[in-house]
Amino acid sequence: MSDLPARLSEHFGPRRPVFDTVLRGFHRGQVSALVDRVLADDPALTAEELRATEFDVVLRGYDRTQVAAYLEQAVDLREGGTAAHGPPASPDGAAEPPEFDVVMRGFDRGQVAVLVGRYLAGDASLTAEELRATEFDVVLRGFDRTQVTAYLEQAANRLQGR
């Protein structure tokens, strides 16, 4: 059961976002306050305000890449688009999100989430070549590179109709 309003749970999943705490990240209280406004569907909160939001960088803050990916989804939703974290589907058409293992050194989770989100949302501008050629940063505690690469290859094949 979702703890979010139906309109928002369609785009952000059934629960509040959970961000990793990192050595130097965004101020947790500031991020939480903004997430509260997004999840409350505050009509005064505009896409421009979301884009212009800056957080203090502090010790033991929220992962900056994850927060930025979440804000990008919130901006898309405010502008009438679909959030990249919308109801996911796997390349074989199932209604399940891809699950990648988190490994010591793997692909940046925020970057992977944005690209996979575009694929799952049916972004017409996304090509099979882009899925195959995209390079992600390698970071600590990232998604397993082999799993992500295999998933993106399946997605590219699906886009090409194979």
Image: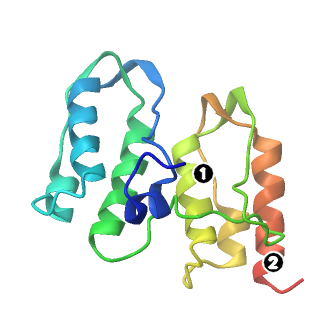
List x then y, in percent, for residue 33. 21, 36
Left or right, residue 86 beside residue 21:
right
Asked where in the image residue 106 lies, by quadrant, the reply is: top right
Q: Is residue 148 above or below residue 41?
A: above
- Tell me the kind of residue under disc 2: Arg
Point out the image quarter for the C terminus: bottom right
Residue at 48% over, 27% down: 20
List x then y, in percent, for residue 74. 33, 58
Disc 2 designates what residue? 158
List x then y, in percent, for residue 151. 79, 58
Between discs 2 and 1, the one toward the N terminus:
1
List x then y, in percent, for residue 56. 19, 27
- Tell me the kind of residue under disc 1: Val
Q: Is residue 34 above or below residue 96?
A: above
Disc sitting over residue 96 in the figure: none
* Mark 1 element type: helix
